């Protein structure tokens, strides 16, 4: 049995043509697949330029960008800096073995910072945490001493609370030092001096806006970020004669 074809009336043809055009125009555009490594990285850097909350000053980002652009000079300088840093650590390896489990986790709050300070020829080191808490800020400090066997011993452990005014003062000093825009490492490094490491964490309630920052400075006493630590050191009510702060 032959099924007869339906005849399409001529007045109906324009409507079919319009419907076909609408369907074609509304068809979602398919982004061409990017397969090559160079294409992926080029698009990646373009996207980052449009994201204001991305930290493009971090060392890891700069290394990735330099590698992609075949910037051998930058890579060589970054390698040299890390070699010097490793040499310094090897001179005083015991300074990195202190137990920090007694300290509060700065990431348990909306904003927190951890300062670690030590100096060459000094038998003490300090770690101070600062947290933004309801009504102000909390400062926890620990002073370590190294015995004749270079073992780490806690000699002082303080916890102090301050009001909102103290937090705003600390935050203003941190802003003046431009902490969140600083490079992770600087070119200033040596053997006979002091070392300051700062870890920062803050969040705004949106997961994408959570920020982490690490800054390491050699002999920072006369720098703005070094003065931030001195301010916190004074608030913590701890001191050591061999610390290189007057």
Image: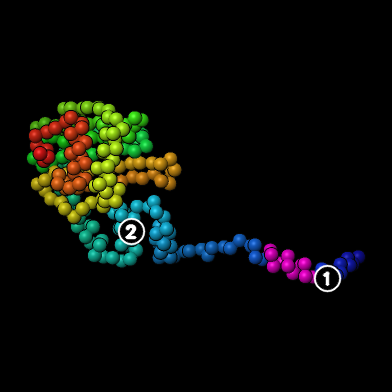
Q: Is residue 17 visible?
A: yes
Q: CA distance from mark 2 to mark 1?
A: 63 Å
Q: Between residues 11 and 143, which one lies in front from this camera angle? A: 11
What secondary structure is found at the residue carrying circle 1?
Answer: helix
Image coordinates for residue 203, horizontal then vertical, percent? 38, 41
Please give left or right for residue 233 compared with residue 101 in the image. Answer: left
Q: Which residue is mark 1?
A: 11
Most frequent secondary structure within the magenta stretch:
helix
- The coloring applied to the image is rainbow
What secondary structure is found at the residue carrying circle 2?
Answer: helix
Span colored in magenta: 13-23
Please give left or right for residue 174 compared with residue 221 in the image. Answer: right
Image quadrant holding the C terminus, namely: top left
Residue farthest toward the right in the current orientation of the protein = 1
Please give left or right for residue 148 compared with residue 231 in the image. Answer: left
Q: Which residue is mark 2?
A: 64
Q: Is residue 89 visible?
A: no
Image quarter for residue 210?
A: top left
- Residue at the image position 77 percent from the left and 67 percent from the top: 15
């Amino acid at each position: 049995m032959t099924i007869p074809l339906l005849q399409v009336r001529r007045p109906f043809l324009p409507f079919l043509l319009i419907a076909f055009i609408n369907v074609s125009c509304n068809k979602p555009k398919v982004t061409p697949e990017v397969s090559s490594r160079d294409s992926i990285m080029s698009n990646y850097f373009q996207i980052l330029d449009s994201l204001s909350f991305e930290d493009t000053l971090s060392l890891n980002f700069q290394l990735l960008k330099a590698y992609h652009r075949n910037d051998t000079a930058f890579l060589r300088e970054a390698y040299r800096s890390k070699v010097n840093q490793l040499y310094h650590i090897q001179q005083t390896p015991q300074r990195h073995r202190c137990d920090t489990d007694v300290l509060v986790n700065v990431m348990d709050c909306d904003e927190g910072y951890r300062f670690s300070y030590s100096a060459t020829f000094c038998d003490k080191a300090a770690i101070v945490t600062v947290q933004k808490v309801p009504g102000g800020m909390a400062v926890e400090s620990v002073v370590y001493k190294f015995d004749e066997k270079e073992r780490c011993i806690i000699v002082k452990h303080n916890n102090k609370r301050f009001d909102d005014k103290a937090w705003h003062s600390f935050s203003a000093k941190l802003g003046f030092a431009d902490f969140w825009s600083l490079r992770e490492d600087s070119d200033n490094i040596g053997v006979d001096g002091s070392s300051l490491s700062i870890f920062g964490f803050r969040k705004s309630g949106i997961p994408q806006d959570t920020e982490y920052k690490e800054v390491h400075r050699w002999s920072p006493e006369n720098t703005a970020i070094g003065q931030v630590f001195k301010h916190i050191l004074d608030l913590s009510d701890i001191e050591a004669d061999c610390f290189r702060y007057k």
